[in-house]
Image (cartoon, grey):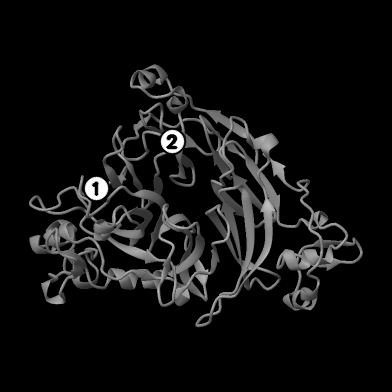
């Protein structure tokens, strides 16, 4: 059952059920000086708690609140739960959340003024509540949270933030990946009690190599863990700095490269005037800071509460790793620097084609378009990518309800029904993966524009299902066909 969340409600697309959860605190919200549009209940968390329960949190007119609902009936299950540190106070604040091992991991702002950013664990039956150190810029500095993933013994958080190591250059934004142990129980009563003892973070390096590297520093969207070259990896959309030339890129990162960065050297600044440098290895205490209790150099420790003070003090002061995580092949999959509109969202099909051996990227943009990219993923070679299609998805008659912008806010690939769902602020558009009727009299060109989702059915005289890659190569010469701008195959929900 797929859900589409939004203002005061969400829709179950498969059965068109609707549940309304309106706030009762509008008057209190407006008294605080907020506009009426800000005083709705914006649903910011909507995740499965288990196979039977859905966990939802809303801004609730700047009074964040959470509820449990039965998936089968959408009836409320139990009492409301305070949403602070689990849900932001307003809709524009970023947040992520997921359940792992029965605990709820969240990353958001914890206060009305959005001054206290936190990575937080709560709602577990046996695990203690933990958070990042409060008001410490070495841990978090004006973060924008994008994604959270459970993988192995850890929960990973992906975000962008103001780089503490580049303060001399002004407010430079870097993309980060942070990691915490799922069995973290906090520190001792002397150091880091009720705080993470395993929090580490590293920079994600998405750049074009050369004599002078060109960086895409701002993370916009990220996938869950998938397979690239038979190795676990994540893919993300990155953009340039706000005051730089407009540019976007898609970079991939192997999970073992992320682990390698967390097992590398730590970064330190000895005083406010000095440069950031690696911490000498002989100064790193044992067990190694950031290890999970019972694992690695901390095998002898049953709980993080028994870690030595030296280890806890070190991780409190030096959570930043020295080496950045390199992207796969040390370069982006795809770059776009000729458009004034940046890319915003990403969906990936790593098993496209009749033999399930092709990778297709779907990229949403600020101007309501979706790019379809065929990506080559062979190891140890330069990525070869082909722009298959550039679709103007935004439908002003359906989506422009109150003058909203055209920015793509979400992409969801439905492989079973061969469709892509594109989310805007006021609507969701369904885009079929097969759209050959939009190709005028030269439907053969559809084969080039849409592989590997099509084959040529001569009996029906239209493109359906799949096409072998050899036939695609044969048809590469058909490069002068007109592609219409028809929207007949785009359906608004």
Question: In the picture shown, does residue 217 fall above or below 48?
Answer: below
Q: Are marks 2 and 1 in contact (CB under 8 Å)?
A: no
Task: Report the front residue among 403 and 445.
Answer: 403
| Image position of 52 (left or right of 143) | right
Q: Is residue 55 visible?
A: no
* Mark sitting earlier along the chain (2/1): 2
Depth order, front residue of 339/395: 339
Mark 2 Cα within 10 Å, few/some/many (few <14, many 20+)? many
Q: Position of residue 285 (x, y in %)?
A: 12, 69
Residue 303's place in the image compared with 209, above or below, is above
Q: Position of residue 268 (x, y in %)?
A: 18, 65
Q: Mark 2 against mark 1, which lies toward the viewer?
A: 2
Examine the image and state in which quarter residue 377 appears: bottom right
Q: Quadrant of the C terminus?
A: top right
- Where is residue 458 shown, x and y percent of the image? 90, 66
Residue occupying image coordinates x 15% and y 74%: 280
- Where residue 398 appears, as percent x and y from the top left, is 68, 35
Asked whether, in this view, residue 437 is left or right of residue 34, the answer is: right
Quarter where residue 258 is shown: bottom left
| Whether residue 165 is visible | yes
In the picture of the structure, the residue carrying the numbered disc 1 is: 130
Q: Which residue is mark 2?
A: 91
Q: Is residue 351 left or right of residue 254?
A: right
| Vertical order, 179 against 137 (above or below) | below
Q: CA distance from mark 2 to mark 1?
A: 24 Å
Q: Residue at x 24, y 62 (%)?
A: 320
Number of labelled discs? 2
Helix, strand or loop at disc 2? loop
């Amino acid at each position: 059952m797929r859900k589409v969340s939004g203002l005061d409600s969400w829709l179950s697309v498969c059965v068109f059920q609707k549940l309304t959860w309106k706030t009762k605190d509008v008057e209190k919200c407006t008294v605080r000086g907020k506009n009426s549009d800000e005083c709705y209940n914006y649903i910011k968390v909507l995740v499965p708690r288990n196979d039977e329960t859905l966990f939802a949190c809303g801004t609730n007119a700047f009074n964040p609140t959470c509820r449990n609902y039965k998936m089968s009936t959408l009836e409320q299950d139990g009492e409301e739960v305070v949403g602070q540190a689990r849900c932001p106070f307003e809709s524009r604040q970023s947040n992520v959340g997921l359940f792992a091992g029965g605990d709820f991991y969240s990353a958001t702002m914890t206060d009305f003024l959005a001054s206290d950013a936190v990575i937080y664990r709560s709602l577990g039956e046996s695990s203690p509540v933990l958070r990042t150190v409060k008001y410490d810029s070495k841990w978090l500095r004006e973060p924008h949270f994008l994604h959270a993933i459970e993988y192995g013994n850890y929960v990973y958080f992906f975000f962008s933030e103001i780089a503490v190591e580049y303060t001399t250059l002004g407010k430079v934004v870097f993309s980060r990946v942070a990691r915490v142990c799922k069995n973290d129980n906090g520190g001792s009563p002397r150091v880091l009690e009720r705080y993470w003892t395993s929090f580490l973070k590293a920079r994600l390096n998405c750049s074009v190599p050369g004599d002078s590297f060109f960086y895409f520093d701002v993370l916009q969207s990220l996938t869950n863990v998938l397979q690239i070259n038979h190795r676990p990896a994540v893919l993300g959309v990155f953009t340039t700095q706000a005051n730089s030339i407009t540019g976007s890129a898609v970079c991939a990162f192997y999970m073992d490269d992320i682990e390698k960065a967390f097992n590398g050297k730590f970064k330190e600044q000895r005083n406010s005037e000095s440069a950031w440098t690696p911490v000498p290895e002989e100064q790193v205490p044992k067990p190694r800071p950031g290890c999970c209790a019972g694992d690695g150099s901390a095998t002898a420790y049953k709980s993080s509460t028994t870690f030595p003070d030296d280890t806890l003090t070190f991780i409190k002061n030096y959570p930043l790793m020295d080496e950045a995580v390199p992207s796969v092949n040390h370069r982006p999959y795809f770059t776009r620097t000729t458009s004034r509109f940046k890319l915003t969202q990403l969906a990936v099909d790593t098993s496209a084609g009749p033999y399930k051996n092709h990778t297709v990227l779907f990229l949403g943009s600020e101007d309501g378009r979706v790019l379809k990219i065929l990506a080559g993923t062979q190891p140890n070679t330069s990525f070869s990518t082909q722009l298959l299609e550039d679709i103007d998805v935004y439908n002003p008659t359906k989506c422009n309800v109150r003058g909203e912008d055209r920015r793509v806010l979400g992409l969801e690939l439905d492989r079973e029904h061969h469709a892509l769902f594109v989310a805007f602020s006021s609507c969701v558009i369904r885009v079929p993966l097969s759209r050959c009727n939009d190709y005028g009299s030269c439907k053969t060109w559809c084969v080039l524009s849409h592989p590997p989702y099509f084959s040529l059915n001569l009996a029906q005289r239209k493109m359906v299902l799949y096409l072998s890659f050899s036939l695609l190569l044969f048809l590469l010469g058909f490069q002068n066909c007109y592609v219409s701008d028809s929207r007949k195959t785009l359906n608004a929900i």
